[in-house]
Amino acid sequence: MSQIRPSVLLALLCSAGTCAVASSDTNDENSGIEKITVKSSATANKEPVGTFVSLVSNLEYDPRVDLQSRNMGEAQADVTIRGGIFENTGFRVGSATLLDPQTGHYFAEIPIAPEMLSGPEILTGADNALYGVNSSVGTVSFGWKPIKTAGSVSLGAGNHNFNLGRVHAGFSVPLENSKDWLIGFEGEYSFSESDGTIENGDHDFNRASGRVQLVGPSSQTDLFFGSQDKFFGWPNMYTPFNVNETEDLSTQLLMLNHKQYYASDSSFEVSAYSRRHKDHYVYSRDNPSAFQAFHETEVKSVAFSGRHSQTQSFALNYSAQFMEDSIESTTLENNFTTRQYYKASVLPEYQMSLKDDQQLRFRLGAAFDDTNRDDSEVSLLGDITWNSFNSDNTSQSIYLSYAQASQVAGYTAIGGSNSSGLFRSNYDLERETTTNLELGLVLDGLSWTFDSAIFYRKDNDLTDWTYSLSSTSARSANPVDIDTLGFEVLATKRFANAEIISSYTFLDKSEDYGSADIDASFYALNYPDHRLTLGAIWHPTDMVEISVDNEWRKQQENILRNGDDQALFTHLTLKVSPAQVQGLELVLAADNLWGESFEEIPGTPGRGEQYTLTVTYRW
């Protein structure tokens, strides 16, 4: 692995005034600029090809995220941010991070229809340290949207015996005798199935979700329940032994959320949820008795976050969350089957007005993480931001941030057997800590944006899953210290009838496992050295929309990967909206247009080509 030289980092930081990243968050409580965020979407396509839309759909074409999938992203998605691993990434809805205590492979199992949520927003640096829980590198954050009276119904079909059906509807009306209050109801049901884009890659998914919402002059309250069931297969899904593995998942989520606005530029949000997840894993569908595992996890949590603006120049950002989990498993051998998590963070903010519509902002605070089974950790976080606002509605911002964060390992990594089986735990795993130094710049024009960031991250005791030539029958959990140097840039340009989205990311890592008996990494060292994305949305006529997302990557070498370390993926969509029938849409879509066989996870076959035709009627 190439080594990161301090002199190289210093030189890049000194020159980053022309290449660094930041942006403003649209939510009051997230007024920081620790992430790449643009006014338009980071991808051209919003709907996936091959199943119904979920919270991870098309994240594989988002330049801020690396989605490493088995079968497809909506089947099993390892969502990584800035070269971290899947367990470094959290999913936050409202004020609460949704946790799966068994393994981060199931973090994205969230049965919420995307129409109900805003986002995704990618929190990194100080914002992640402030709002994320047990997610040391990044958080994918969503907020609850107001319900609108609208709906849609969709039917789809495609190659590999693919079929899809979906219905979604929302209804919002004023309360009787109280015109300032609205009550809303929203629900959806979705299903899809296919034989799979490769042999033994079939799936059968369904999801039902609904919520009731009460909106007042300065508040919004949502009560949500969702349930989804997913069966899917894939050769070498988790193990490199040429077997056809399957997963059967069932997830239920009950969530209550209340957001309250008050005073000037002040708000708070309270979220509470109960999540139950079941997993039935079969090592070989041809011989189920060879090995299978059953897991059932339950998580209960309450979270609180907000922003209190004391004066025009001073505000307090804060967040807190408590979680309690439990697991029933056929593979865990010790008594480590329950845990309680505590997180509290505060980030005071001071703003200073400068001449010529310029502003300087200082934030400095701390976060406290603890569990009833692990050592606690206090983390420092803060940033300095310069903003300049022009009379023509353009702006520039530069920031420098420093943030620490920490997390603890999941039960699969720490609670199973450490001497036998396919997945071997490590009882000596300690709390993981991350330090992130970042310099950023954002330029916001009338029809274009340019965002970039350069960062240097130190991960200590990061839990990785590794492979050894001396023990080829298993993958093992091991700690590793990794230094990561990263650079990312995202640019968009809007025309009268088109939009272009382009990005480039670079990652360089140096690692120390403290052991010579580790020959390959499944996750921590599975990252792209170079990655380019190019998306476009074109409206040649009022009736026709053409959307395309492209991704090219050069992946770090890995002895477990079969085939090339380079890949090119394309997602192409043609949408026709006939003027004769208002609300009707005909969508032809193709994913992996060039038949790329790249292994996103070393040793696990990549997805094949998928073509679909979907008919949707909206009202």
Image (cartoon, rainbow, N blue to C red):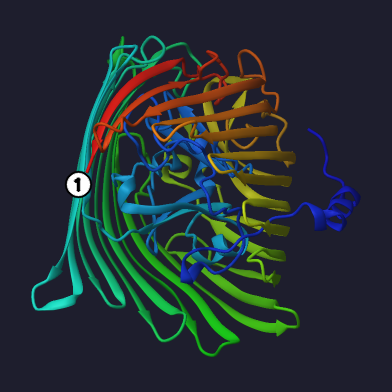
Q: Is residue 6 left or right of residue 547?
A: right
Most foreground residue, 376 or 597: 597
Q: Is residue 516 left or right of residue 344?
A: right
Q: Residue furthest bottom?
A: 311
Secondary structure category for the residue under label 1 = strand
Residue 135 percent across, percent down from the top left: 51, 54
Q: Dot 1, crowdedness within 10 Å: few (<14), some or many (≥20)?
A: many
Q: Quadrant of residue 568?
A: top right
Most foreground residue, 259 or 520: 259
Q: Is residue 511 above or below residue 603?
A: below
Q: Is residue 416 above or below residue 271?
A: above
Residue 412 percent across, percent down from the top left: 43, 40
Q: Quadrant of residue 313?
A: bottom right
Q: Quarter of the image containing the C terminus? A: top left
Query: Total of numbered circles in the picture?
Result: 1
Q: Is residue 355 above or below residue 254?
A: below
Residue occupying the point 60% across, 29% down: 551
Residue 420 in view: no
Residue 27 percent across, percent down from the top left: 46, 66
Residue 614 percent across, percent down from the top left: 30, 25
Q: Residue furthest left?
A: 176
Please give the residue where the numbered disc 1 appears in the rendered image: 169
Residue type, numbered disc 1: Ala
Q: Quarter of the image containing the N terminus? A: top right
Residue occupying the point 67% across, 52% down: 451
Q: Quadrant of residue 563?
A: top right
Residue 23 in view: yes
